[in-house]
Image (tube, rainbow, N blue to C red):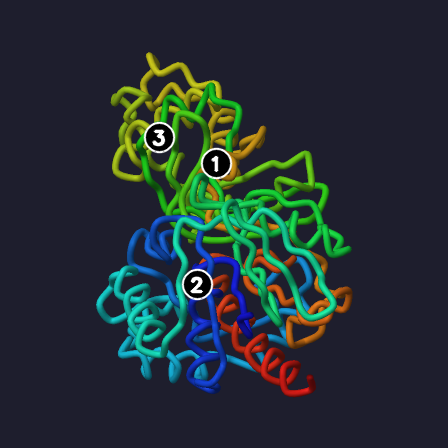
Amino acid sequence: MTDVLIIGGGAAGLSLAVMLKSDRPDLTVTVLERADRVGKKLATTGNGRCNITNTALNPERYHGDRDFAADILLQFGFENQKAFFESLGVLFCEEDGGKVYPRSLQATSVVDALRFKADELGVITMLNTAVQQVKREAEGFAVVCADKTLKANTVVVAVGGQAGGKLGSADGYSVLKSMGHKIEKVFPSAVQLKTVTDVVRQLKGIKVDALVTARSDSGLRTEFGEVLFCDYGLSGPPVLQVSRLYEGGNMTVSLDLVPDMSEDEVKQEILRRCEAFSNRSAGDMLTGFLHRRLGQVILKCSGVDLNLTCGEIPPKAVLRIAKMLKAFDFKAVGTTGFENAQVTAGGAQCAQFFKTCMSKKAKGLFAVGEVLNVDGDCGGFNLAFAWGSAFAAKNGIIEYLGSR
């Protein structure tokens, strides 16, 4: 019989194991990991650099059960997270937007620091061990695996969500469902958007800074940053940030390609260029103002015949060009799915858990991290919730075992 059995050796599971054994060395803590090593998904985060947290952990940057996220971060905020990782030897460095990375800029160093500490503290790690079922018993739980059944006083579901393709998992939802928990619809978030492709295919590979505004039946959101045109649609940080709205239905993405200028200022600049370069080919009118190929696509979408000269562009077309530069619209028709998503939205309803992440349905059962109905924006917010929920569960487990 182990005191604590953690299902999942990812960010939340590993950090929880370390926190528990640091506070209570006398507890037996076992981590079950279905892969051949722990932290595989964590090692890929932040393009391999690991955006470990954010200096501004505002609850407004979270979705789903936002109030629950707020409660968790009150318990274990940025300064707590910084102190925890410094104790493991991981120093922080900050980039724009409050994004925090390990000073090494290597996600693997975060995994290693957690793994080394877990080993030093005596955490038992069982690799290549997939959980098939969790059963409640008179004294604790029975965790059924392919070739063994393990007994535990407490069980923690820390398997993450479905984002990340083969590195993701839906196993946690089935475990929690079997214990009576309701699961909010899960869908990919922080993911690339598919659009109608007649225009984006002409722009494939072009990157442009733009103000991105997404509108859907579930709301409106605006983000600024670098947009990448792909043959299937749109990518880039601001697109990933607004992608969650796709699940609301009827989504349109509008790019303001010149956010530092008003529509009238853009119109006056186009009129100036038409006059100054009156003998130049119309297709080159925006050269030096926009990426050349992007400018030509804008002109064609505005109904301009590229065989004309700049001086022959009609006034009505000038107005259309200005409007399109301020609102280059795309109809979203899908996402690139869990395979490419950074985050899983949806999950186990947090109202069925205490602030300690212990289940109200089955005392002694805990859930942490992405399996819960909390998802954050890009920028370190999701890993911050993983560390925070691990801390809350650590305190809850110690309190629960003490009460027994």
3 or 2: tag closer to the N-terminus: 2
Q: Is residue 323 left or right of residue 308?
A: right
- Residue ID at (32%, 32%): 286
Q: In the rendered image, which quarter is residue 165 located in?
A: top left
Camera-side mark, 3 or 2: 2
Residue at which label 1 appears: 322
Q: Residue furthest top?
A: 307
Which residue occupies the foreground of this view, 70 or 333?
70
Residue at which label 3 appears: 294
Find the distance from the CA under tag 3 to the CA under tag 1. Answer: 14 Å
3 or 1: tag closer to the N-terminus: 3
Q: Residue furthest left?
A: 104
- Residue ID at (28%, 66%): 112
Q: Which of the image's four quarters has the C terminus?
A: bottom right
- Residue ID at (42%, 20%): 300
Is there CB contact under 8 Å for labels 1 and 2? no
Is any atom of residue 239 visible in this view?
A: no
1 or 2: tag closer to the N-terminus: 2
Q: Amino acid at mark 2?
A: Ala
- Total count of labels: 3
Is there CB contact under 8 Å for labels 3 and 2? no
Which residue occupies the foreground of this view, 299 or 128?
128
Q: Amino acid at mark 1?
A: Ala
Relative to 323, does residue 386 appear above or below in the rendering?
A: below
Residue at which label 2 appears: 11
Q: Is residue 170 left or right of residue 140?
A: left
Relative to 310, does residue 4 appear above or below in the rendering?
A: below
Camera-side mark, 3 or 1: 3
